[in-house]
Image (cartoon, rainbow, N blue to C red):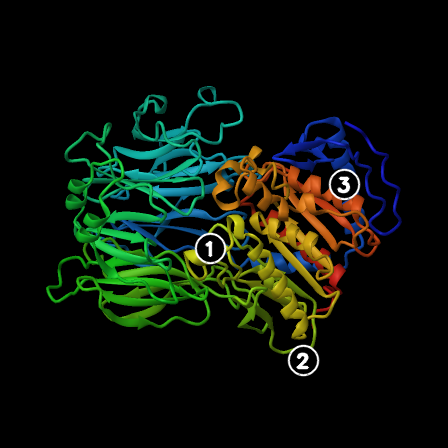
Amino acid sequence: MVTQPAQDARPGTAGPYPPARRTDTADDLFGHRVEDPYRWLEDPDSPETRRWSEAQDALLESARRGWRGRERTAARLAELNGAGFEGSPFWCGGHRFLTRRSPGQEHAVLLTADPGGDGGPGPRGAAERVLVDPMRVDPAGTTTLDAWSPSHEGRLLAYQLSEGGTEESALRVLDTATGEAVDGPIDRTRYSPVAWLPGGEAFYYVRRLAPHLVPEGEEQYHRRVHLHRLGTDPDEDPEVFGAGLPATNYYDVRVSRDGRWLTVSASAGTAPRSDLYLADLHASPAERPALRPLRTGRDDQTSLGVGHDGRAYVFTDADAPRGRVLVGDPAELYAAAGGPDGVPQEEWDRLLTDLVPQDPEAVLEDVAVLHGDGSDPDWRPRLLVCRSRHAVSELAVHDLATGERLHTVELPGLGSVGSLSPSDPLVPGGGYEVWFGYGDHTAPDRVLRYDGRTGAVDVWAEAPGRVELPPVAVRQVVYPSADGTGVRMFLVARTDLPPGPRPTVLYGYGGFQVSLTPGFSANILAWVEAGGVYAVANLRGGLEEGEEWHRAGMMGSKQNVFDDFHAAARWLLDNGVCEPGGLGISGGSNGGLLVGAAVTQRPDLYAAAVCSAPLLDMVRYERFGLGRTWNEEYGTADDPEQLAWLLAYSPYHRVRKDTAYPAVLFTVFDQDTRVDPLHARKLCAALQWATSADPAERPVLLRREKDVGHGARSVSRTVGLAADTLCFLADRLGLDLEATP
């Protein structure tokens, strides 16, 4: 290991960059010499890394003092976030469950309302009780509510909390009538679904093996499906599925309302394919369910749920990359299973029929069945179907028996629909209505209600707080990528300003089937209100145009994502939305990889970049955090062909000395157990060494935050992070945050 001299001090408002040793560390991988001069920054606890990080903190603070309008921006962000939100209600046994964040609250709370006097769903104004408030658990605000699942009858609630920003969920159970603890905590339940058995005495869930049972470094993997009976020791819970399968598997579990059918799906990490298993709990004990493979080894994603009518509803992208719904008899499917590869394809095709065929342009997102409560002999059960057409949601009603499309449901505009939540058909008055969240770029999200008896849609709940919003408009454009593929992009801008180039932020993600759909964003509105333009590009790698769109941006095709992003930038410049020097970019996680690739591939296009919780060393990414679960998305450096893909775009390995790189602000979180902050540390050091740009004009900065992880956070932390990123971009792009137009 050879150490090079420290960098020279550089003049400028950002101050001199902290010295960082460059070493001759390198690996020989399949004939490639892969240099890694800042590998020592992978160790966050070494004295040298600590000193370097503290010096970066001081550098950021020095630069922050020159950002105009931070207090005003933070105050406005607090106002916009102060609108809060109301979650869609979820119904079990007439009990209503929902989350709400009211003005002044740091985190959303989980509430419940009891059934009406007839046992049916209580009215909108029924008295509510708080079940889980993260701030009562932890007044410091570092505890988050990760997931929750009521029992079928609504008497019990399983919920998962992560403390200290660790995202390491622990599962607990409480009594919904008294709020008293019933069971738990059960640790190692991060990303665990909960599938209750009728009666609420037991549930299936997913738990990682104890650390002493797995190889060192694999503590985040090795999941198993277990059955837990309330009041028993979770370490004695019978393991029902997962032994002998890949260590990186994720599992989903479901139990039908009548308690007969257990469904387990398995996927290797985030791979866009799944295996499907089914057990008849009337024919085998819950502790040892006879799970039979229904569909395994296929290159598609397929899930199955058994409805209140006893039919199996199959949601699949097999031979339908935009999704379709099949229907059949679960008993017949179970009887046809048994072989190691599941139900033979010819039997699968014979036993299942299309209920909702694939739409040639719209992606199937969700369905909800309206059975009714059985009291109306003239009621025809129907299916509410949500699709996304070019990232904009639409709803349609179909006949449940035939699949015939009956009519379209009117929605307010260019927006997105959240999960569909039907009322419980097993209680009086239930089974006729569906609730769903609705969001767009122009107003806080709200909850809408569809009444299947009348076909009407009304606003069931709005954001708890009221906030004045700027006059904004949204338009969607289509632009050509490098290979001629048409890509869509949303543009958000004020309507009361004259046309002309304006400081613009371009945002993207491009991976893991994540669709960037319209929704309320305090960050976007604060930027637009100040006179800027915000652009959101629907890059390949997402699911905006179906699974083929996703696969066109993964593995060996990943460069398509970056080409789509560069083409979006060129379109914004060529069409006068912004001027050279007035375009910034932003992205986090996989979107942080996108920003890192944009900065290192086309530094001439971008003036400033915010790179949050990013993946940047694509040769070693699998060694840290949850990296091994993503090799079906990116590829692995253990394969020579895939290593070549990764090296071609890995931002850390594309840094070139004496290149004028954009201004970059890296943001990282010390408790991030998904994407290790080492990625940002290494690229930050590399860019500070390499850039020929004046650090007074294009600084490279690192913002780190303690006691918070990759995902959920308190409102005050959200505001602080957003204020810094917006002020950094405004400072570099020339947007005056002190003077609202």
Residue 63 x, y percent position in the rendering: 79, 50
Q: Residue furthest front?
A: 31
Q: Quadrant of residue 191?
A: top left
User: Looking at the picture, which amino acid does disc 3 mark?
Assistant: Gln
> Callout 2 environment at 10 Å: few (<14), some (14 to 19), or many (20+)?
few
Tell me the residue at 75%/27% (across/down).
Answer: 47
Residue depicted at x 28% and y 62%: 357
Task: Tell which tag, 2 or 1, sits nearer the viewer.
Answer: 1
Tag 1: residue type?
Answer: His
Which residue was labeled with disc 3? 56
**Count of numbered labels shown in the rendering:** 3
Real-space Cα separation, disc 2 to disc 3, in angstroms: 40 Å
Residue under circle 1?
550
* First in sequence: mark 2 vs mark 3: 3
User: Which residue lies at the image location 58% right of the left edge and 41% below the top edge?
Assistant: 643
**Residue 692 point in image, percent of width and height:** 83, 52
Q: Give the distance between the C-alpha atoms of the residues marked 2 and 1, in whole angstroms.
A: 38 Å
Secondary structure of residue under mark 2? loop
Instruction: From the viewer's side, name the closer residue of 10 and 322.
Output: 322
**Split into 4 quadrants, where in the image is the C terminus?**
bottom right
Q: Is residue 414 left or right of residue 481?
A: left
Residue 529 visible, this angle:
no
Looking at the rendered structure, the secondary structure element under dot 3 is: helix
Q: Quadrant of the N terminus?
A: top right
Pointer 2 residue: 498
The answer to whether 577 is drawn above or below residue 112 in the figure is below
Q: Is residue 44 left or right of residue 127?
A: right
Q: Is residue 74 above or below residue 645?
A: below
